[in-house]
Image: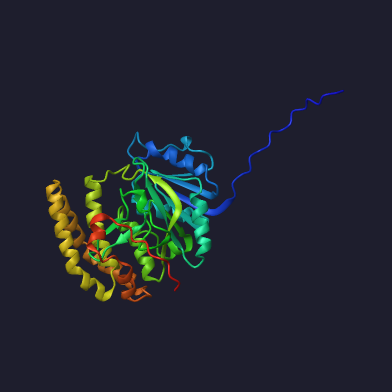
Amino acid sequence: MTVDNTPRPRPQAPQSPTADIAVLIVAYRSRDTLGQCIETLGAQTVRPRQVLVLENGSPEGERIDAATLPDWVEFIESGENLGFAGGNNRLAALARCEWLALLNPDAFPRRDWLEQLLAASQRYPDLSIFGSTQYAADHPGQLDGVGDVYHATGLAYRAGYMRPVALLPEEGEVFAACGAATFIRRALFASLGGFDEALFCYGEDVDLSYRARLTGQRVVQVKLAAVDHKGYASSGRRSEFATYYGVRNRLWVFLKDTPSWLLWALAPGHAMATLMLWAAAIKNGQGKLFAKAIMDGLRAWPQIRSARRIVQAGRTVPASRIAGMMSWKSSMLLTRAPDVRPLEPR
């Protein structure tokens, strides 16, 4: 009896299917988190066709090196910091897929993240923007965000931030998708001109969804599409950078995007809320920085007015519809309560 000792190839595990998705990652001082982000992307049940990583002008000694990335990642390098807005616009211009999946380098997608987003796009084939559930990576049992809420005072907040997971709402419509893990059709992103690069960083995701809403788009928060997010990993939540751009950009988005009579109706409330936040900034030792951000924002009024004319000229929905998607309860603003609404056919 002869024994066949010819080596046979080991059976290969079936490869995950590939979808027409480009994942965009803008990395700034992201050495500590990018590796885990890429690793979780490599384990997706649905693989993206493209993964693009931008080294966005990090200081020397903190820059990402192409040699540290797997060969299925397309590496792009910038000598200067383009901001979150400009960095994503640069990557989007290189994308060749139907869908763009924006992902922060400190966000770690769960295995079926892309699969769930793709499934949502098939459930709602006429919609083009989807948000993800964000769990707090360093705080088990807590949420990091479930969509962005725009309050009638002109203040936007990440809903559910540092709130118990038990508050996670069902899938539904939100005002805006958080940029840390957004899924958007490339054609829509291009038609909107991408992110407003004047904002640089902070508030540009709310602005993008706001401008999309003005053209009749809706935003779906997908409960089962989940990432674990560190948050503020490169800038710090109460850093001078975050405070300055957060305050200035909040004013710009309010003045640029809020339509017609609604702007005048909400202006007194916005001014009052701004004064209250200024008082809080003074207590935290950032009063002068807050004032500088407001003054710089107001000095840019000619630029804002020009951008406003373009944005409002493209508006196709009544201001009342925008008002209807805003949150009007002070209690929700104070508690960062989620505002996810049943998606009604339109």
Position of residue 234 in the picture relative to residue 118 (left or right): left
The residue lying at 50 percent from left, 59 percent from top is 120
Task: State the residue in front, 82 or 147.
Answer: 147
Residue at the extreme right of the image, as rendered: 1
Give the percent coordinates (x, y) of residue 323: 30, 71
Res 82 seen here: no
Task: State the residue in front, 196 or 280.
Answer: 280
The residue lying at 38 percent from left, 51 percent from top is 180
Give the percent coordinates (x, y) of residue 162: 30, 48
Position of residue 181 in the picture relative to residue 249 (left or right): right
Give the percent coordinates (x, y) of residue 314: 37, 73
Q: Quadrant of the N terminus?
A: top right
Q: Quadrant of the C terminus?
A: bottom left
Q: Which of the 4 image quadrants contains residue 105?
A: top left
Give above or below for 40 relative to 215.
above
Q: Which of the 4 image quadrants contains residue 221?
A: bottom left
Task: State the residue in front, 346 or 59.
Answer: 346
Res 272 seen here: yes
The residue lying at 52 percent from left, 52 percent from top is 115
Position of residue 48 in the picture relative to residue 330 (left or right): right
Give the percent coordinates (x, y) of residue 84: 35, 51
Coloring scheme of the render?
rainbow
